[in-house]
Amino acid sequence: MPLKIRQATQADLMLLNELGNNIYRAHFKHMWASESEMNDFLECEYALSTLEHSLKEYGVCWYLAETDHPIGFAKVTWECTIPDTEISGVLLNKLYLDPAETRKRYGQLMFDEITELARRRGKKFLWLEVLEQNDRACKFYSKLGMRHIKDTYFKTTSQQSRLKIMGVSI
C-alpha cells in the first residue's frame, strides 16, 4: 500500500492524541519502571492542549503517515541547537509508526521525506534523540547515516534513561 505523508492540522488533534498514546505505549511501555510516570509523560506529550499549542508553534510541524488508514507520525522543529554544543539544525523530535507497520520501509520513507523537506528549506543538518535501549531505532538511524554525537539523560522520579543524540549532514 502506498504511503502518503501530509502535514497535520488542528483538525488532526484527536488523531495525533490517539496515535501518540497508542504507538508510544506499544513500543515503550516495557521500558518504564512506573506506569503512572509513563501516563504522566504521555499526558504532557499528547494532551490535546499541548498538541494544539504545538501545531500553532512557529518553526514546528507535525506530519501524519497514512496508507488506507493512519499508521504513524513525525514531529519536526526546523531549527534547534543540540544542548551544550554549537551544533544546530533540524530536530526530528518524533518519528513513530504503529508496530504492525514496522519493517515495511515506511520509517525510511518518512525519514527521507523529512530530509527532503529540510533540504528544501536550506537546512544542512538533521539530528534527533533516541533511547539507548531502543536498539532497533539506533540501528535504523545508523543505517541512514546518522552518527552518535553525545549522550543526554531523561530522568523521572523512579528511573533515568540514556538518550543518544545522533545527527547527519543532509
Image (cartoon, grey):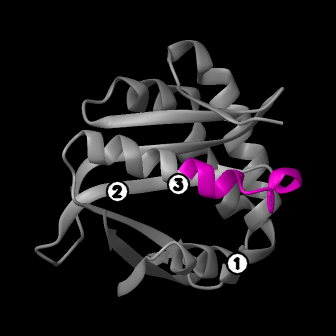
Residue 40 visible somewhere in the drawing: no
Closer to the camera, 170 or 94? 170
Q: Quadrant of the C terminus?
A: bottom left
**Residue matched to label 1:** 136
Q: Quadrant of residue 4?
A: top right
Q: Amino acid at mark 3?
A: Phe
Nearer-N-terminus badge (1/2)? 2
In the picture, measured across the screen, residue 135 lies left or right of residue 148, that is right
Q: Amino acid at mark 1?
A: Arg
In the picture, measured across the screen, residue 118 lies left or right of residue 13, that is left
Dominant secondary structure of the residues highlighted in magenta in the image: helix
Q: Residue at x 80, y 56 (%)?
A: 104
Q: CA distance from mark 3 to mark 1?
A: 15 Å
**Residue matched to label 3:** 111
Say what secondary structure mark 2 lies in. Answer: strand
Q: Residue at x 52, y 72 (%)?
A: 144
Closer to the camera, 107 or 55? 107
- Above or below for 154 versus 20: below
Q: Based on the picture, tell me whether residue 109 belongs to the magenta stretch.
A: yes
